[in-house]
């Protein structure tokens, strides 16, 4: 069963329910006991008064009358003592009788076929019961309020270590290697065991994160040398006058691929270091500057494929961002558009808070849109040798920088990627 209340609220509710159950049972027991005892006492007293009146009837001494709050009747009695019709059906014993909006306690005796009935007004008894009910109700409400208050106090004391642990995990960077352990701050109880489990889990995460960063850094660093060799070789080949037009196009393609790989390696290095506070140390460019560079890079392959490349620069402020990461995000979206568009256009639009890449390609089914940003997920029409990492890298960079990327479809076909950027630096 899933609870929507917090643990502290559940403790308070438990206290209130327990108090309501105990206090309610206790109050009902008090009311029932008092009512029963009073009825027994009244029955005994009324029975004694009736016996006294019966003795007076035997000796024919009527100088004594019933008490002021009592009425006495008997069969064959004269005047006011005549037994009324509404009382003739009563059997021997104690009864409760209602007459003319008033209630009475009645004691009945049958002697030699004659019915004797003594009535006593129970207004005082009912008033005492009302007072008793009011006192019990007030006590029940006060006990419930006290239980809620005690539950709140105890919930705060019980939950204080858990809240403290949650605050430490939330606000302390426990993934840093120098982060102090949590367990020494807590007693050897359930919360202490939770802190020990946090320490163990965070330790494993630190180790895994460290291994991932080292691997990414090592691989990216080692790739720089062969990429430099390839780039230098391409430059030398392009300077060779004997190279024909076809060969020159192939070498330029290799050089472009080397440049893309170099930028990708640089992006991986920056993500491996993953310190957003160091972003100011990276080269900064505006969205339009990055867009101009990428358009020069991608215009030829896009137009060679027979597509129209449309650029709408917009009116953005002089806002500057991490050039390497912004270049990777925009470049991967343009590469993705080129990869999945056979005819029509690719449009790059700069907006006031980011940019937008649109195409008239095959589009992405609605059921696969969310999964497209996961690693190794590719479109329905798989083309080339891509591994499906481009959009995953875009998503990772955006999360790292506090940006956002969203995907929607276009009519009648195509995709629209909208990237919103936070303000990094304004000149």
Image (tube, grey):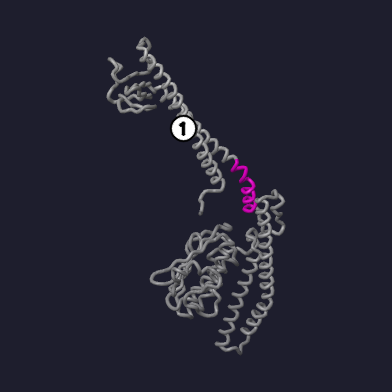
Camera sees residue 262:
yes
Placement of 347 over or under 229, stated as above or below: above
Rendered location of residue 126, percent (x, y): 41, 25
Residue at 63% across / 69% down in the picture?
A: 268
**Residue 174 figure quarter:** bottom right
- Which of these two is toward me, 370 or 12? 12
Residue on which the image places disc 1: 32
Residue at 59% across / 81% down in the picture?
A: 254
- Which of these two is toward me, 401 or 197? 197
Quarter that holds the C terminus: bottom right
Placement of 356 over or under 75, stated as above or below: below
- Which of these two is toward me, 111 or 335? 111
Residue at 60% across / 41% down in the picture?
A: 154
Whether the magenta-drawn stretch holds residue 158 is answered as yes
**Magenta-colored segment: predominant secondary structure:** helix
Whether the magenta-drawn stretch holds residue 422 is answered as no
The segment highlighted magenta reads 154-171
């Amino acid at each position: 069963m899933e609870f929507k209340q917090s643990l502290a609220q559940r403790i308070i509710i438990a206290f209130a329910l327990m108090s309501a159950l105990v206090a309610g049972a206790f109050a009902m027991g008090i009311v029932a006991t008092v009512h029963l005892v009073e009825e027994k006492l009244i029955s005994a007293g009324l029975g004694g008064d009736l016996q006294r009146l019966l003795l007076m009837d035997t000796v024919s001494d009527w100088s004594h009358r019933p008490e002021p709050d009592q009425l006495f009747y008997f069969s064959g009695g004269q005047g006011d003592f005549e037994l009324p019709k509404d009382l003739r059906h009563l059997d021997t014993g104690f009864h409760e009788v209602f007459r003319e909006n008033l209630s009475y306690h009645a004691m009945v005796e049958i002697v030699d076929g004659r019915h004797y009935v003594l009535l006593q007004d129970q207004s005082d008894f009912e008033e005492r019961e009302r007072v008793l009910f009011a006192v019990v109700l007030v006590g029940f409400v006060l006990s419930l309020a006290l239980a809620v208050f005690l539950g709140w106090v105890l919930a705060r004391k019980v939950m204080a270590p858990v809240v403290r642990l949650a605050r430490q995990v939330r606000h302390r960077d426990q993934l840093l290697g120098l982060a102090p352990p949590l367990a020494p701050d807590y007693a050897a109880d359930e919360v202490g065991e939770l802190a020990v489990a946090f320490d163990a889990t965070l330790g494993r995460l630190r180790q895994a994160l460290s291994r991932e960063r080292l691997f990414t850094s090592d691989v990216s660093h080692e790739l720089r040398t062969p990429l430099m060799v390839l780039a230098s070789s391409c430059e030398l080949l392009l300077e060779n006058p004997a190279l024909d037009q076809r060969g020159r196009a192939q070498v330029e393609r290799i050089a472009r691929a080397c440049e893309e790989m170099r930028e990708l390696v640089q992006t991986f290095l920056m993500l491996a270091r993953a310190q957003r506070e160091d972003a100011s140390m990276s080269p900064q460019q505006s969205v339009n500057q990055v867009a101009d560079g990428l358009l020069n890079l991608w215009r030829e392959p896009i137009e060679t494929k027979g597509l129209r490349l449309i650029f709408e620069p917009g009116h953005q402020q002089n806002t500057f961002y991490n050039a390497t990461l912004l270049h990777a995000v925009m470049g991967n979206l343009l590469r993705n558009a080129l990869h999945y568009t056979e005819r029509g256009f690719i449009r790059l639009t700069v907006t006031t808070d980011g940019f937008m890449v649109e195409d008239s390609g095959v589009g992405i089914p609605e059921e696969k849109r969310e999964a497209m940003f996961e690693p190794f997920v590719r479109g329905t029409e798989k083309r080339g040798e891509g591994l499906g990492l481009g959009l995953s890298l875009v998503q990772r960079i955006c999360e790292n920088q506090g940006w956002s990327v969203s995907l929607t479809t276009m009519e009648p076909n195509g995709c629209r990627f909208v990237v919103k950027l936070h303000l990094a630096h304004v000149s």
